[in-house]
Amino acid sequence: MDYTTWLAFTLMATLIVISPGPNGVIVLKTLGQYGYKPTLATISGLFCATFMHGLFVLFGLSALLIYIPQAFIAIKIMGALYLCYLGIKSLKQFFNYNKYKNESVDMNGHVQISDNQKSSRYFWQVGFIT
């Protein structure tokens, strides 16, 4: 490998490593919107999913996707659709928040948004599926 190829590879690998992926975006969104306890549940779900993926690789189950390309394409499409669903859901929550934020302010100036209290299991599942 010559110097320019090595430099291009290093640059691209660095950009890929430092860019936030879907996991980082979900963690930051959860932290900003719900606080640290739900974020810990989300991180726990991400960890469990990553661990399971590692087990699949260890036992050779992930290698099956090489021999069944349709399954790999189906998994990629399902993942992309799920991320689109989460993005649309987040945008709807954002615009609904801005739409009603001036209508429900208490005497101290605090915005009263009725958001369903979600369980730690919900946040774990979001992290796991992501």
Image: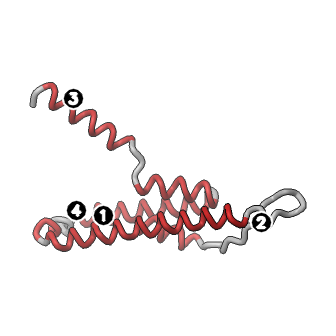
Disc 3 + disc 1, Cβ < 8 Å: no
Mark nearer the viewer, 1 or 2:
2
Q: In the shown orientation, is residue 86 left or right of residue 117?
A: left
Residue at 51% across, 62% down: 42
Q: Which is more N-terminal, label 2 or label 4?
A: 4
Write down the residue under mark 2. Answer: 112
For the question of whether residue 130 can be seen, the reply is no
Write down the residue under mark 3. Answer: 7
Numbered disc 3: secondary structure: helix
Residue at 16% across, 27% down: 4
| Distance between the alpha carbons at the discs numbered 4 and 2 | 49 Å
Numbered disc 4: secondary structure: helix
Write down the residue under mark 1. Answer: 53
Mark nearer the viewer, 3 or 4:
3
Q: Residues within 10 Å of mark 3 (few under 14, many from 20)?
A: few
Q: Quadrant of residue 13?
A: top left
| Distance between the alpha carbons at the discs numbered 4 and 1 | 9 Å
Amino acid type assigned to the residue bearing label 2 in the image: Gln
Write down the residue under mark 4. Answer: 58
| Distance between the alpha carbons at the discs numbered 3 and 1 | 31 Å
Q: Which is more N-terminal, label 2 or label 1?
A: 1
Q: Residues within 10 Å of mark 4 (few under 14, many from 20)?
A: few
